[in-house]
Amino acid sequence: MNPYIISKENNGALLFTINRPDRRNAINYEVMSGLEKAIDMAAGNDVKVFAITGAGDQAFCSGGDLSAFHSLKTETQAYGMLSRMAGILYKLLVLPKPTIAILNGSAVGGGCEIASACDFRIGREGMKAGFVQGNLAITTGWGGGSILLEKLPQNIAMKILLDAKIYTAEELRDLGFIHHIYKNHPIDACLSFMSGSLEKETTVLEAYKTLLNKKWRILSMRERMEEEAARCAVLWRMRLTIKKWTNS
Ligand SMILES: CC[C@H](C(=O)O)C(=O)SCCNC(=O)CCNC(=O)[C@H](O)C(C)(C)COP(=O)(O)OP(=O)(O)OC[C@H]1O[C@@H](n2cnc3c(N)ncnc32)[C@H](O)[C@@H]1OP(=O)(O)O
């Protein structure tokens, strides 16, 4: 089974589907490569909207593949993975096209970080999501914490990160993390939510995203996301030490 699917929807939408439903669409290095490829394709003139979703109806994305990344023992090894994904999420953040995460199911940990890097987030009725990293004695490590602190009011973003809770779709909408709750087919819901963008000239879409990207540059988002990855790598290593001592 291909770990990801890249497909062109009608009238200019490009869809990236994480296709590992048996792993709750966890991110491994193959999925990272696919996402890099899809983001490059989305920059093309024939694409107006870039959407990300997960296969199946259980999960959008369960974050990093813990079985694949379990072998990362040193700070340097962890940083290599974390900084690669932080770089991908920065490219997603500054893609000069409107982007949307279709939360077709649960989104936890890095899954929430991927969703945060998109301009918009819509969630299926009944889905849940949470930045659970704090429960694992680490922080966000793909830049999603830095992004959340800019996209939501600072106190709300900090509460979400510090509590590391799982929220319902309604709670996520009230917090401002998701912008719409849908009932029907995810692609129909996405095309309906993004219909305004899909009707515009690509030049208009690129121009508005360029305005937003100026803000990200002024806020030094690339450097902040990199520092987040480096800090998470330190905690990743410390966590392994704690686990060794506590045999937890
Ligand atoms: C790498 C760092 C990164 C970062 O933020 O920087 C992170 O993402 S850290 C956070 C990593 N993710 C997690 O801790 C989430 C772990 N998974 C879950 O909490 C649940 O699986 C959930 C809520 C996503 C879905 O729960 P559900 O009950 O629907 O499914 P199961 O738990 O029974 O899982 C089914 C099946 O999938 C495997 N699985 C789930 N998540 C992962 C994962 N992240 N990596 C690898 N494999 C995952 C799980 O082991 C089950 O496999 P099975 O062989 O059927 O037992």
Image (cartoon, rainbow, N blue to C red):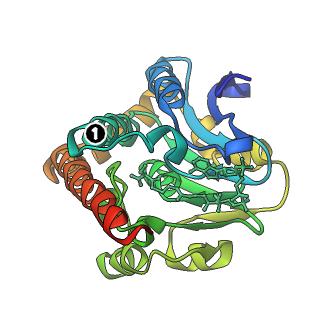
x%, y% of residue 133? 42, 64
Residue 86 spot, x, y in % from top left: 32, 42
Residue sitting at 35 percent across and 59 percent down?
140
Quarter of the rendering containing residue 23? top right
In percent of width and height, residue 145 lies at 33, 61
Could you classify mark 1 by the number of other residues whose Cα lies within 10 Å: few (under 14), some (14-19), or many (20 or more)? many
Q: Is residue 104 visible?
A: no
Q: To which residue does mark 1 refer?
A: 83
Q: Is residue 215 above or below residue 5?
A: below
Q: Quadrant of ligand 1?
A: bottom right
For the C terminus, the quadrant is bottom left
Residue drawn at (30%, 55%) of the image? 236
In the depicted view, which residue is nearer to us: 33 or 209?
A: 33
- Look at 37% across and 38% down and name the residue there: 85
In this rendering, the answer to whether 121 lies above or below 90 is below
Quadrant, the N terminus: top right
Foreground pick, 31 / 198: 31
- The number of numbered discs placed on residues in the rendered structure image is 1
Of 96 and 27, which appears nearest the observer? 27
Q: Residue 214 sits in which quadrant?
A: top left
The correct choice, above or below, for 247 with respect to 47 in the image is below
| Amino acid beneath label 1 | Ser
Instruction: Provide residue 25's location: percent of width, then percent of height.
Output: 64, 43
Badge 1 marks a residue whose secondary structure is helix
Work out which residue is located at the far right of the displayed protein and give it. Answer: 184
Residue drawn at point x = 28 percent, y = 35 percent: 80
Decide if residue 10 is on the left or right side of residue 90. right
